[in-house]
Amino acid sequence: MQHDTTTRKAQARNLAAIRRNAAFLDIQAAQQVAAASRSFSDYLADIFGDRLADVTLAGYMPMRSEISPLDIMANHPGPVGVPVILRAGTPLEFHRWTPQTTMIEGAFKALIPANADPVIPQALIVPMLAFDRRGYRLGYGGGFYDRTLEKLRSAGPVLAVGLAFDAQICDDLPTEATDQQLDAIITGSGVIWTRG
Ligand SMILES: Nc1nc2c(c(=O)[nH]1)N(C=O)[C@@H](CNc1ccc(C(=O)N[C@@H](CCC(=O)O)C(=O)O)cc1)CN2
Ligand SMILES: Nc1ncnc2c1ncn2[C@@H]1O[C@H](COP(=O)(O)OP(=O)(O)OP(=O)(O)O)[C@@H](O)[C@H]1O
């Protein structure tokens, strides 16, 4: 009898520890997302000042464990777009998004607006798997953001800012000639200026 209770308590302890751990990680992540969102919005306001409402911002619909930029997007005073893949090997388009926009599944299961309203961003929140202090990033390997930033930058100044968890930082990543550097990366700890 005593043995039974001891065993059952041990099992209950294992389960409780898993549950508490998940709750702990949820809170830590939510706090990082909130802190990164505040830093990002402050950063944009510092750079663009009273022109912020004229700036078109590209965000993204978060997939997998990407940090969510949705609060930043919803609070931006100007137009907001999200990436849309037209074809492999071509730059992304950005289609107008608001919190009310009806979304459908696009290529690679990323959500895209049901109705296409293309916009050209002057500032981009760039998703990624990893980044380094030089501003190089690792995406899912399609080269979409590299091609997109190359095209946008050849037409005029654009600000490309990574949004990430602190844990996504890496020592110098492998790079190639077509990799476009980010102007900064923003995490829950603040702005990381790149050596771009
Ligand atoms: N939220 C978000 N939206 C985005 C991007 C992104 O990185 N994040 N993209 C940024 O470019 C584009 C989507 N690019 C993607 C490219 C590959 C895979 C992907 O799942 N790749 C598989 C391999 C697929 C295959 O080879 O068939 C994988 O990684 O396992 C997903 C998205 C546009 N929208
Ligand atoms: N501007 C470009 N012109 C031609 N090829 C390119 C260009 N940019 C990237 N590529 C090629 O695309 C492929 C994928 O690039 P890379 O591995 O850097 O993708 P990624 O940055 O991780 O993905 P993504 O930008 O979609 O998140 C590479 O073979 C790269 O050489």
Image (tube, rainbow, N blue to C red):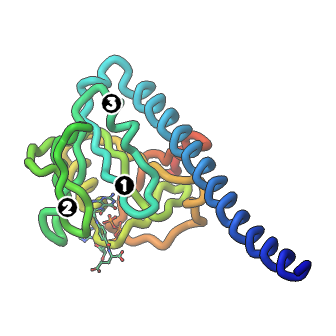
Depth-wise, is mark 1 or mark 2 nearer the camera?
Answer: 2
Q: Residue at x 22, y 33 (%)?
A: 79
Q: CA distance from mark 3 to mark 2?
A: 24 Å
Name the residue furthest top.
Answer: 50
* Distance from mark 3 CB to nearest ligand 1 atom below 8 Å: no
Nearest the eye: 99 or 171: 99
Kind of residue indicated by mark 1: Pro
**Left of 152 or right of it: where is 130?**
right
Q: Secondary structure at mark 2?
A: strand
- Is disc 3 surrounded by few (<14), some (14 to 19) or many (20+) residues within 10 Å? some
Q: Residue at x 65, y 61 (%)?
A: 19
Q: Which residue is mark 3?
A: 76
- Is disc 1 surrounded by few (<14), some (14 to 19) or many (20+) residues within 10 Å? some
* Distance from mark 1 CB to nearest ligand 1 atom below 8 Å: yes
**Left of 15 or right of it: where is 108?**
left
Please say if 88 is above or below 119. Answer: below
Q: Which residue is mark 1?
A: 62
Q: Residue at x 36, y 26 (%)?
A: 48
Kind of residue indicated by mark 2: Glu
Splitting the image into four quadrants, where does ligand 1 fall? bottom left
Q: CA distance from mark 3 to mark 1?
A: 17 Å
- Residue 135: which disc? none
Q: Which residue is mark 2?
A: 105
Q: Position of residue 168 (x, y in %)?
A: 55, 60
